DNA sequence: ACTGAAAATGTCGAACC
DNA sequence: GGTTCGACATTTTCAGT
């Protein structure tokens, strides 16, 4: 699907705040309410906008200990990869997991309450997964930018 | 604020799909529409739910080249940190940036079109920032999990 | 893409358990 | 804390042009 300037603006606006009403958007974009409505539906149908979510403040829900954990497997056979990946999907603490190039195979973003809970997670969950070679954890000290936005 | 089981369920549901209507939520939670409405307002007022956003498919908007870039500064003085951080905020390609412990100081999540655009970004934007010691880029090969969710 | 109108939801007060 | 009821405002949705 081809996107014009208005589509791009609309996508950016909805990535910042999806609770804006079509009326508000229509004013920002100089369109009618219906035109906005139709553009959004088109973006949804084209799966350019995939979903709408609420964002939660980790500090207020006892998940302020945030860790980036890199994982290396002992081998890179298809089987090892898929065992690891399907186990990761089951772990609630893991919010994101990406297969990456470089020294390590995966990077995980993990939300827990504190170091103790992280230790529990590592010992009883993550490192019980088969075929893990090594891991390296980086703890989040501060959040500089967390836009969750792809600027188009 | 103290959260009961229903609050937690509600938070998880809204993190998965914030477009659910209060009516749908009321059925899922065995509450009245009004009760759902009031709980959500309370969560918003308490800033437990901070905002609502649309998620975009990077492949459909020409941003399928995703990079985790770790950055090390040459020194850790307050001044160097804040110069770096304020420069990062200006870069549209950087969706997320966190200050982390460990070998590197920061990790960045970057969305661009392709390797060429990434090279442009590195040469003309990122590495022109003062006080950067070294960087290390990991390219995303695959997405295993991208829930953007904090399970409570 | 627009206008206009119907249908669905959101919002909130009141009375009550 | 929870409920139902009711009413109005707002928004979504869709015909027709």
Image (cartoon, coloured by chain):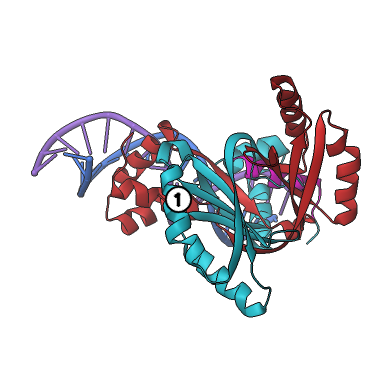
Chain colours: A cyan, B red, C purple, D blue
Which residue does the image show at 91% across and 42% down from the upper left?
B123
Location of mark 1 (residue): A119
Residue A77 shows up from this direction:
yes
User: Nearest the camera: A129 or B25?
Assistant: A129
Q: Is residue B134 left or right of residue D17?
A: right
Q: Vertical placement of B41 versus B64: above or below?
A: above
Instruction: Tell me if residue A107 comes above or below residue C13 in the rendering.
Output: below
Residue A33 lies in quadrant? top right
Residue B63 at what x, y percent from top left? 78, 54
Which quadrant would residue B1 be assigned to in this image? top left
Residue B17 visible within the image: no
Looking at this view, is B79 or A37 the one in front?
Answer: B79
Q: Is residue A50 magenta?
A: no
What residue do we see at 50% from left, 61% from top?
Answer: A126
Query: x, y (%) of residue A45?
Result: 65, 63
Mark 1 element type: helix
Residue at the (31%, 55%) spot, across then down: B29
- Towards the viewer: B4 or A65: A65
- Tell me where the magenta segment starts and ends, as one range: A3-17
Classed neighbour count for the residue bearing mark 1: other residues with Cα under 10 Å, few (<14), some (14–19), many (≥20): few
Number of disc labels: 1
Q: Main secondary structure of the magenta part?
A: helix
Residue B128 falls left or right of residue A101: right
From this view, report whether residue A121 is shown above or below residue A16. Answer: below
The x and y percentages for residue A66 are 53, 44
Disc 1 is attached to a residue of which chain? A
Q: Nearer the viewer, residue A115 or B49?
A: A115
In this picture, is B44 found above or below B76?
below
């Amino acid at each position: 699907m081809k996107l014009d300037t208005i589509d791009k603006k609309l996508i950016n606006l909805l990535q910042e705040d999806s609770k804006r009403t079509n009326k508000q958007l229509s004013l920002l974009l100089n369109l009618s309410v219906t035109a906005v409505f139709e553009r959004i539906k088109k973006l949804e149908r084209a799966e350019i906008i995939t979903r709408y979510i609420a964002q939660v403040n980790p500090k207020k829900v006892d998940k302020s200990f945030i860790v980036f954990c890199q994982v290396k497997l002992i081998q890179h056979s298809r089987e090892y990869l898929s065992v690891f990946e399907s186990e990761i999907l089951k772990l609630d603490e893991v919010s994101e997991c990406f297969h990456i190039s470089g020294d390590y195979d995966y990077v995980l973003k993990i939300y827990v309450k504190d170091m103790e809970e992280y230790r529990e997670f590592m010992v009883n969950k993550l490192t019980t997964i088969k075929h893990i070679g090594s891991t390296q954890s980086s703890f989040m000290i501060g959040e500089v930018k967390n836009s969750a936005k792809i600027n188009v």
